[in-house]
Image (tube, rainbow, N blue to C red):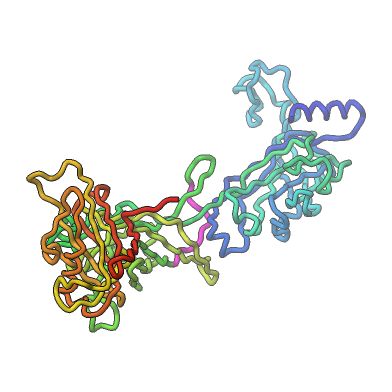
Amino acid sequence: MTNMFKKSLVALALAGVSTGVMAADIATTSTTTVSNEYLEVNSTVDSNAISVTLDDEYTENDFLILTFPGTNSVVLGNLATSISVPSQSVIVGADDSATAAGQVCDPASGTYAGSADCSNDYDTKSFTVDYVLSDTDDLGNTYVKYRVTNLGTSGTSTVAAEVPFGSVTVNSSALQGSSSYDVTYFARPNYENYSGSGLATETGVDPLDTADSASLFATGDQFSVSVSTPFDQTVDVKDPSNRTLFVDAPTNQDVATFTISENTVDVDGVPTAFALKATFVDADVSISGNNMFGWLADSDPNNTVFDYGTQVAFNPANCGADLAHTAGEMTFTCAAGSLGVAETLTFTLNGTEVVNSGSFTIDAVVNYSDGASATGSTDLESADLGMWDVNGSVTFIPYMPYSAQSEANQAGLAIDQIIYVTNKNSSGYGSGIVPSISVRYILEDGTEGTLSNTDLGGIKADAGITKITGQVRQALFAEGLLTSSKKVALEIVIDEDPDLIEVYSAYNVGGSDRGWVQNDSQRVFN
């Protein structure tokens, strides 16, 4: 395109038409890296310096035009209104006496490769460029127009002259939602007054213009949370633990390490730190998991504030303030000193409360400022914080009705339960250990408890089908839970591979009306 346009200029000159434009190269001292959080708390952002090196002969009143993405994206009051191009070496021709073809003439020494003379190739030149106006082009981008106003009398060429436009101030709203932001340069001869319309391509530049672009800004999210060590213990379903302890963990502890960090941004394939960034204030952190915190017990029930005792610990304790939890979520605050510092969270089981298996997820909301009064917050992308496995099968039956009974193994009750365990181990156990069964119950008022394998009469889940209806009902009666009619949720716990275990659950009323209860070992498809 550049060569084609230069040839067009030659043709115009031969035809007697005055012209002298338009090739040039635009550059910035470097791409300014700015975080999205900085843009949220600062209304404007300054670029690094912009310069344009002219590659053609420019004449007075030729137009030099900078285009910026977005409507009203540039703060006009901060633009340079008059630019004095200092006296500098410019190219005035090629010395035919050069003996080294293709070598670049050194303007300081006036020679090719320090020998052949080329002093006639260079001259010095200074001139002035003045601001004309700024407007919006047909594509909704902001263009700023300058004009060559005084070429002066020294020198005869503008080729290789560098025009220092300096820094521009861009409205933050123009950068938000983009990963990069470029400035584009093109020019028009003095007889063609560019008005933001005309022969425009998708870049908003006349296809005859030799446009050039340079990167002004690279943007990205400033903060993230990462996990270097996830939780990874296994809950023991066997007696005497009954899901209150870990397997092969004498201390009954598990640790996870996470870090809230500052990101980098990609600049030409190189990870680069943010030059302009927000000030980290603190972070509101949440760790979630389905009923993964129900095991926590108040170490001092007489205290008005939940006492975690040794069950939860932070190191180096930049995090942990405002600690609170529900069955499915734990929340706390990380202070300003936590940024970039790995924090280790340690859970220590109390050995009395039942522990669920499942996964943990960490989320964080970072609060930041401009270092003064403007503040903001951002939700970080969630991270996997590990999981607790279980060395057995856990099947949840969400509902099972029981009639009141006054004696053990009482017959003729209005409601009967039907609970079967199927063990699909086709090879059997021979002289090995047959998996034991235990049950966790939840009453209508939220009361929870465990029926150990001993409470269930030592029943085993041997290969095949095992009915456990009577053992469960008798154990509930022995606990004093069936003095009145009850609805009870049950978790059937078996120390065997969950892929081998299925549980059937139902009940009948009056011996004939059967109600099937779906549990989570069963799936129903259309």
What count of labels does the image hold?
A: 0
Q: Name the residue nearer the viewer: 313 or 317.
A: 313
Q: Is residue 211 visible?
A: yes
Is 277 contained in the magenta span?
Answer: yes
Q: Residue at x 72, y 37 (%)?
A: 24
From the viewer's perspective, is 282 left or right of 15?
left
What residue span does the magenta drawing correspond to? 272-281
Question: Where in the figure is residue 17, as x and y percent of width and height?
Answer: 91, 32
From the viewer's perspective, is 502 left or right of 408?
right
Per the picture, the main secondary structure of the magenta-coloured stretch is: loop
From the viewer's perspective, is 447 left or right of 35?
left
Q: Quadrant of residue 402?
A: bottom left
Q: Name the residue nearer the viewer: 167 or 240.
A: 240
- Vertical relation: 311 (above or below) 155: below
Q: Name the residue nearer the viewer: 333 or 65.
A: 333
Residue placed furthest toward the left: 431
Q: Quadrant of residue 184?
A: top right
From the viewer's perspective, is 299 left or right of 184?
left
Question: Where in the figure is residue 270, as x and y percent of width and height?
Answer: 49, 41
Q: Is residue 313 visible?
A: no
Is 224 contained in the magenta span?
Answer: no
